[in-house]
Image: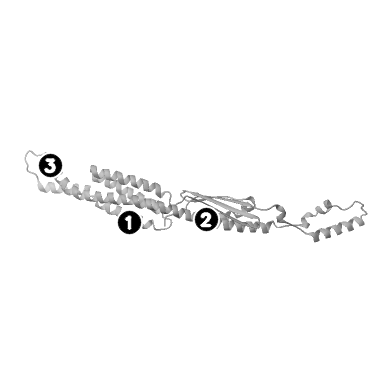
Amino acid sequence: MIKSMTGFSKAETSDQGITASVEIKSVNGRYLETSVKLPKSLNHKEFDVREATRKALTRGSVFVNINVQQGTTSQLMKFNEEAATEYFSAIEKLKKRLKIKEPITLSHLFAFADGMVESKQDDASEKVWKLVSKSLGDALKELDVMRKKEGNEIARDLRNRIKIIEESLAKIEDKAVQRIPEERERLRQRIAQLFESDEIDEQRLQLEIVILADKLDISEECVRLRSHIKFFHETMKQIDAGRKLNFLLQEMHREVNTIGSKANDAEIAQIVVTMKEELERTREQVQNIE
């Protein structure tokens, strides 16, 4: 199945005051190139984001933008009252022992804040990543749907253009069959002009006709072109068809060029121009395929 390399998707997941949103934009690219923008707190998860993208996509320049909105930092902190009480008792004992009259204030206790305040940052970071991971998965699925939908439109256009090429090839084959007797008579007339009499060496004439027919014969090129067209249709049903289709178009273009150069006929030359135009438009479309 053909997929386009261009697309856009967005997914958002919320839980307990935390919202994780993921936007993905993809455009044409020869290989898979992923650019990731993450909040600083999730910079260590960049590899995971790239790996998830690599599993979902094979080609294209992909831009992943991740945003996280969450509550105030107070939601990420827990005050340990038991530890604060123990610190206060210890300071009170020390105060009596040293005979210090100064009263104990919160500023004294806050000197030991590291022991009284427990951070939930690690737990919160893991919760945020779970939300981001879900949003990323949803966004990648939505992007895949969009790329398939656009791929269907591209496939429809490709089939129409390949059909035109097939019809043009049929015209060339019909014309090529008619050309042999025409060229034979033309050659006979040209040779007759070289002689004063109407006597012509039939054996030499037949030899020249064989040589000319061999030069004008485009049957092999037509057979190969039909084979490429058949394989083109089969390849369109495959996954990751972009590179194969591009290679096939190069081969088809080569055969069409050979047909045009060997045919040496104005009518066939016009048909060849039409085929080249369609091949070029087809090539432009194939550049959008994954």
Q: Secondary structure at mark 1?
A: helix
Q: Where residue 201 appears, x then y in whole percent?
A: 9, 46
Query: Which amino acid, by three-letter code, is at mark 1?
Result: Lys
Number of other residues with Cα within 10 Å of mark 3, as a class: few under 14, some 14 to 19, many 20 or more: few
Q: Which mark is residue 177?
A: none
Q: Which residue is mark 2?
A: 140
Q: Which amino acid, mark 3?
A: Gln
User: Does dot 2 land on a helix, a strand or a loop?
Assistant: helix
Alpha carbons under labels 1 and 2: distance apart: 33 Å
Sequence-first tag of 1 and 2 = 2
Between 115 and 262, the residue placed more toward the observer is 115
**Observer-nearest residue: 125 or 245?**
125
Residue 189 is tagged as 3
The alpha-carbon separation of the residues under discs 2 and 3 comes to: 70 Å
Q: Depth check: 84 or 33 in front?
A: 84
Badge 1 vs badge 2, beta-carbon distance below 8 Å: no
Q: Quadrant of residue 236?
A: bottom left
Q: Residue at label 1?
A: 230
Alpha carbon distance from label 1 to label 3:
41 Å
Earlier in the chain: of badge 1 and badge 3, it is: 3
Mark 1 residue crowding within 10 angstroms, few (<14) / some (14–19) / many (20+): few
- Nearer the viewer's eye, disc 1 or disc 3? 1
Query: Which amino acid type corresponds to the residue marked 2 in the rendered image?
Result: Leu
Residue 290 in view of the camera: no
Q: Secondary structure at mark 3?
A: helix
